[in-house]
Amino acid sequence: MTKYSKFALCALVFGAFTMTSCSNDDGPTTPPSIYQRLGGTTLVADPDNAGQMIEKGRLSYRKVINSTVGLIVADIGSNASGNLGEHFAPLLAEVQASNTTNLAELVDNLTDFFSFNTGGTNPVNTYSGLDMVTTHNPALNPRMGTNSTDANFDKFKGYVGAAAVQNGVTANTQLYTDIVAVVESLRAPIVQ
């Protein structure tokens, strides 16, 4: 074989290898869901339940929800302007009477709701609570203290954003923007 034909053969093999390794026969890929970006279905030890495992995505949401509740309670306790005390009056009265059953149910329902609606597909993430319109209408749900305004909703969205940051979601990232967008998508059924 001449030098030229050896060179051509090498170039052909190299080109075929390069084209094959760069080709994408799978078609367009779907970007990972918010749930996946928060840890997905990877099982980790549940810090709140010794000896149990929890999906990392679900744990991430539970942490954000617990922190959101903490921020709301702190503002109510300090009588901060625009706090959401009226909205949670029935629940706060129960907690002050040392009954935390409904608070735990609220945290579980919110964890289910956000996990399910952002890509948590395992049965543990199934939401079975009330729809958003019924949940946030005091005439239909005696657990809701009052109707929500846009200002109340903005305050809640701010709590969720701050809670996400407290739990490792960096502000001004796509993940943060996507989480806040999910909350924003609920404005219409919540603000009645």
Image: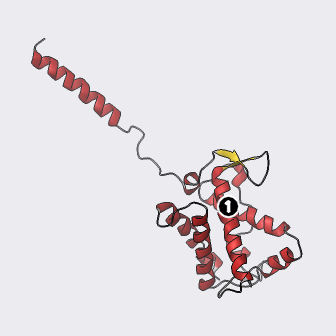
Residue at (62%, 68%) from the top-left corner? 163
Q: In which quarter of the image is residue 144?
A: bottom right
Left or right: 22, with 169 as reference point: left
Left or right: 22, with 105 as reference point: left
72 and 15: which is toward the camera: 72
121 and 38: which is toward the camera: 38
On-image quarter of the C terminus:
bottom right
User: Is 142 placed above or below 40 here?
Assistant: below
Q: What element carries label 1?
A: helix
User: Is 111 placed above or below 46 here?
Assistant: below
The x, y position of residue 123, in whole percent, is 71, 50
Mark 1 — residue?
Answer: 63
User: Is 28 placed above or below 168 here?
Assistant: above
Tally of numbered discs = 1
- Residue 99 can be seen in this image: yes
Left or right: 96, with 191 as reference point: right
Residue at (68%, 84%) from the top-left corner? 83
Kind of residue at badge 1: Lys
On-image quarter of the N terminus:
top left
The x, y position of residue 145, in whole percent, is 77, 83
Residue at (63%, 83%) from the top-left corner? 152
Residue at (33%, 31%) from the top-left corner? 20
The x, y position of residue 36, in whole percent, is 57, 51
